[in-house]
Image: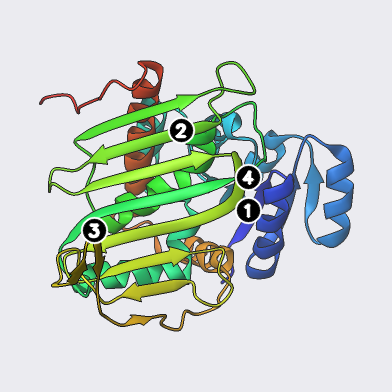
Amino acid sequence: MTPRVAHAGLGQWGANVVRVAGELADLAWVCDRDEAALARFAGRHPQARATTSFDDVLGDASVEAVIVATPVPTHFDLARRALEAGKHVFVEKPPAMRSAEMEELVALARDRDLVLMPGHLLLYHPGVRMLKELVDSGALGDVLCVYGNRQNLGTIRSHENALWSLGVHDLSVILWLLGEEPSEVVAHGSAFLQAGVEDVVFCFLRFPSGRVAHMHLSWLDPHKMRKMTVVGREKMAVFDDMELERKVTVYDKAPWEPAETYGEWRTRTGDIFSPKVATDEPLRLELEHFLRLVTEGPGDHREALDGLMVVRALDRLTDSLRAQGEATLPARA
């Protein structure tokens, strides 16, 4: 039976989410403080009741799950209230802006056996899924490092910096690909346009396995980049979301493969190929997974725990950023 859900947040991204939710689930409510937005979306989803009060949503016993796609600072409070009301929750990233808040959400979900799923969209992108298969299968050899580039000119935000706005995407992918939490994180950044809101951030992460990762995050850049590179001992792979056809490219060459040398230049031989990547909409795949969890149960709460790992890393990177790049290490047991 199709789960009965409510959707909160009809902004730019929320409009996409409610579109898909309305196609996949029994959409019972749409909720937003903006009455004009409510009027527009009520017309598109005539079966759903419209309200400016989140309490109306929580008070409907027939609603099994709530989708939260509101501004980031509101995520924690709305997700907490929904879990306390006994609703399964899909909440856009990040679900909280402090580790302690995310831990509270995870504890609530586990205690009540409810689904808590952060909206880490890229984990459902067929191209990133292929990258994960390449890593897990050993096709690249032992992974040495991962680095992400997420840059563009705008959109400038005031309630979150480039780390929390852009970095949450790449960080979720890096931690998922490597399957471990960083043992050391360092972040440097600068706030050029708004005091206290870093618009350019560079991050370094070291992991217990010895692998390292790097993120360049900026909304002050002439190029729009959405790229993730994985370097292995045997091969390298690149996911480039700006490419229309070559989303994933595999380079059949290793960092120390025998090469001919011409002065300071080294040439390497090896195939370069781009495997076919499915064109399924990541948002649809993501919400399908959430609704499946609502129907079948949260299981081991893997999604919530992965979300906690991301928020913990963001929290530590923020500490480093505020300490002007001082490395942060995990607390000793």
- SS label for mark 4: loop
Q: Would residue 254 be found to the left or right of residue 289 on screen?
A: left
Label 3 and label 4: CA atoms lie apart by 52 Å
On screen, residue 278 above or below 54 = below
Label 2's element?
strand
Q: Pointer 2: what residue?
A: 201
Contact between marks 2 and 3 (CB within 8 A): the answer is: no
Closest to the observer, 320 or 32: 320
Q: Are marks 2 and 1 in contact (CB under 8 Å)?
A: no
Which sits in the foreground, 184 or 71? 184
Residue highlighted by disc 1: 62
Marks 3 and 1, Cα distance to the nearest angstrom?
A: 70 Å
Q: Secondary structure at mark 1?
A: loop
Label 2 Cα crowd, 10 Å radius (few <14 / some 14-19 / many 20+): many
User: Which residue is nearer to you in this view: 310 or 9?
Assistant: 310
Discs 3/1, front: 3
Mark 1 or mark 4: name the one nearer the start of the chain: 1
The alpha-carbon separation of the residues under discs 1 and 4 comes to 21 Å
* Marks 2 and 3, how far apart at CA: 32 Å
- Asked whether residue 114 appears in the rendered view, the answer is no
* Among the 4 quarters of the image, the one containing residue 22: bottom right
- The quarter in which the N terminus is drawn is bottom right
To which residue does mark 3 refer? 264
Q: Residue at x 47, y 58 (%)?
A: 122
In this rendering, the answer to whether 192 lies above or below 135 is above
Task: Give the mark, 3 or 4, whose residue is nearer the N terminus.
Answer: 4
Q: Amino acid at mark 4?
A: Ala
Please, which colouring scheme is shown? rainbow
Q: Which mark is residue 69?
A: 4
Specify whether residue 258 is in view. Answer: yes
**In this rendering, position of residue 291 left or right of residue 47:** left
Cα separation, mark 4 vs mark 2, equals: 25 Å
